[in-house]
Image (cartoon, helix red, strand yellow):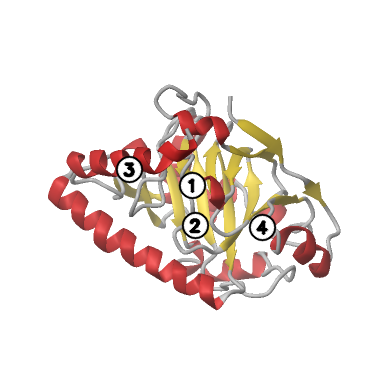
Amino acid sequence: MLTLHPVERRAGLTPEEFEEQYLFPLKPVVLTDMMDEWPAKNKWTMEFFKQEHGDILVPVFSANYSKPGKGYMTPDKRIPLREYLETIEAGPTDLRLFLFNIIRHAPELRNDYKVPTIMEGFYKEFPFMFFGGQGSKVALHYDIDLSHVFLSQFYGRKRVVLFPPEMSRKLYHHPFTVASYIDVNNPDYSKYPALRGAWGYECTLNPGDTIFMPSGHWHYIEYPDAGFSMNQRANESYVRRAKGLVNIARHFVVDKGMNKIMGEDWRKMKEDIAKKRAEEYA
């Protein structure tokens, strides 16, 4: 198995303590009290969203999201939020709803949460929500814009596995993407020998928890239960913001363009490059 260390759990951190112990070292931490004063902590339930906002049309995605070809990185379908929530409540499913800015559809929800004050540089207009059914998984990746992410769990649990950016080659990072296709739970060391030197962090998020995922950290997520969370993004560095914009351009212009032209051959080419880059660590 991969070497995974537990993520520290903290409460009562001052901005100065957070900066010194976690932000500057780029070290993840679970903040157990960030949501304590939010009305959303108890208000945002499955029933609440079904009753109050169930008519919103949402894009849902299956495990086909990252498969090469015509449907690469596109939703499987668009359905009312109520129908989607009923689906994930009914039992195991791989259907997910992610990076969904519900505030654009229901701006009154802004009153139910607060922008954290633990650091500077929060993007106030991009509170993205993530929903998933029991058993659904989020493939290993890092966030394309290189923001710091504060992921707050409202309902159900999430298993989160993180790797720092310096593990990228050992994780067989596919070029021109933010993706790795290793199996976190069952690593194949014969196929990916550099994985033996990889290490990271692991935790389970419970309702009321917020995890700080530093910029560039790889993350893999599992849903032991149907549930949902919201992330808030922050970036205090203009240099990092510029690198994020370059990342976005590379991803959407090069990767999606070459996928349309080459399909499965493009995926194979990226895999070969990832293996060559990792050879020095094997």
Residue nearer the viewer, 169 or 90: 169
N-terminal of the pair, mark 1 or mark 4, is 4
Q: Are marks 3 and 4 in contact (CB under 8 Å)?
A: no
Q: CA distance from mark 3 to mark 4?
A: 28 Å
SS under mark 4: loop
Point out residue 277 in the picture as x, y percentages from the top left corner: 39, 44
Other-residue count near label 2 (Cα within 10 Å), few / some / many at <14 / 14–19 / ≥20:
some
Q: CA distance from mark 3 to mark 1?
A: 19 Å
Q: Residue at x 74, y 68 (%)?
A: 118
Q: Which residue is mark 3?
A: 66
Q: Amino acid at mark 3?
A: Ser
Residue 26, labelled with which disc? 4
Q: Is residue 45 above or below residue 195?
A: below
Q: Amino acid at mark 1?
A: Ser
Which mark lies nearer to you, 2 or 3? 3
Q: Is residue 59 above or below residue 85?
A: below
Is 260 displayed left or right of 207 in the figure? left
Other-residue count near label 4 (Cα within 10 Å), few / some / many at <14 / 14–19 / ≥20:
some
N-terminal of the pair, mark 2 or mark 3, is 2
Q: Are marks 1 and 4 in contact (CB under 8 Å)?
A: no
Q: Residue at x 68, y 38 (%)?
A: 203
Q: Which residue is mark 2?
A: 53
